[in-house]
C-alpha cells in the first residue's frame, strides 16, 4: 500500500505541475491592451492627358501641318510641342515628364540627330522637370526638339525614315528620398 500511495502522490504532483506550467494555474504574464484610432488614408493620384494634337514647327517657327511629308536635311531643327493636363495629388507627390519613342529604334541615329529632353512651361512660364503636387490639374506645355546635325557628312541618313508616330510624353513618379526629395 505504501507504493500505491507513493504513486498516487507522485501523479498528483505531476498533474499539478503540468497545470501550473501549462497555463491552467496561477503562473501568468500580465498584459493589457488599448484601442487605437489611427484614422484612414487616401491614395493620391498621378495622371497625364493630352488635351489637343501636338504641333510641329521648323527652325523658323513655321508650323508643319503634315510631319509625314516633311523632308528633313542636315541643319534642320524641328520642335514638337504638346499641351497636357497633369494631375499630381499627394503630400510628397512629384513626377517628371519624359519623352519616349525618340531613340535609335525609331530611326534616330545619335550621330546625325540630337533629341532634347522635354522643356516644360505652365502658363507660359518655364518650370523645372520635377513637377510637384497641386490641388488642381496643371496645364503643362511639353516641348522637345529634334536637331538634324549640320555636321552630318556624306550621304549619311539620306532617304532615312524617322518614325514620329511613337513619340509620346510619359509622367513618371519621382519617389520620395530620391533626387533630393524628402
Image (cartoon, rainbow, N blue to C red):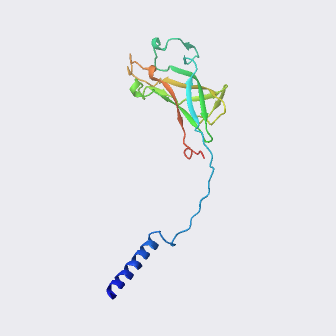
| Extreme residue toward the bottom, this view | 2
**On the rendered structure, is 70 left or right of 4?**
right
Q: Quadrant of residue 108?
A: top left
Q: Which sits in the foreground, 40 or 99?
A: 40
Residue 35 picture location, percent across and down: 62, 54
Residue 153 placement: quadrant: top left
Whole-percent x, y for residue 102 in the image: 45, 27
Instruction: Please tell me which residue is depicted at 50% across the width and 11% down the height of the picture.
Output: 66
Reply above or below: 42 against 26. above
**Residue 134: image x %, image y %?**
65, 34
Decide which of 102, 4 is in the foreground and name it.
4
The residue under the point 45% across, 19% down is 165
Total residue callouts: 0
Please tell me whether residue 148 is drawn above or below residue 17 in the rendered image.
above
Q: Toward which corner of the image does residue 9 lie, by quadrant?
A: bottom left
Which residue is farthest front? Answer: 1
**Is residue 48 toward the left or the right of residue 73 in the image?**
right
Question: Percent x, y for residue 67?
Answer: 49, 14
Screen quadrant of the N terminus: bottom left
Amino acid at each position: 500500500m505504501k507504493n500505491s500511495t507513493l504513486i498516487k502522490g507522485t501523479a498528483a504532483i505531476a498533474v499539478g505541475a503540468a497545470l501550473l506550467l501549462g497555463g491552467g494555474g496561477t503562473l501568468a504574464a500580465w498584459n493589457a491592451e488599448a484601442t487605437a484610432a489611427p484614422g484612414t488614408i487616401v491614395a493620391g493620384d498621378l495622371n497625364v492627358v493630352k488635351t489637343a494634337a501636338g504641333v510641329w514647327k521648323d527652325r523658323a517657327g513655321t508650323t508643319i501641318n503634315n510631319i509625314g511629308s516633311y523632308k528633313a536635311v542636315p541643319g534642320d531643327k524641328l520642335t514638337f510641342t504638346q499641351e497636357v493636363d497633369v494631375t499630381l495629388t499627394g503630400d510628397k507627390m512629384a513626377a517628371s515628364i519624359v519623352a519616349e519613342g525618340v531613340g535609335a529604334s525609331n530611326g534616330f541615329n545619335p550621330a546625325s540627330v540630337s533629341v532634347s529632353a522635354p522643356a516644360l512651361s505652365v502658363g507660359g512660364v518655364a518650370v523645372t522637370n520635377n513637377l510637384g503636387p497641386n490641388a488642381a490639374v496643371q496645364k503643362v506645355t511639353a516641348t522637345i526638339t529634334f536637331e538634324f546635325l549640320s555636321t552630318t557628312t556624306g550621304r549619311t541618313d539620306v532617304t532615312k525614315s524617322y518614325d514620329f508616330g511613337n513619340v509620346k510624353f510619359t509622367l513618371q513618379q519621382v519617389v520620395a528620398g530620391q533626387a533630393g526629395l524628402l
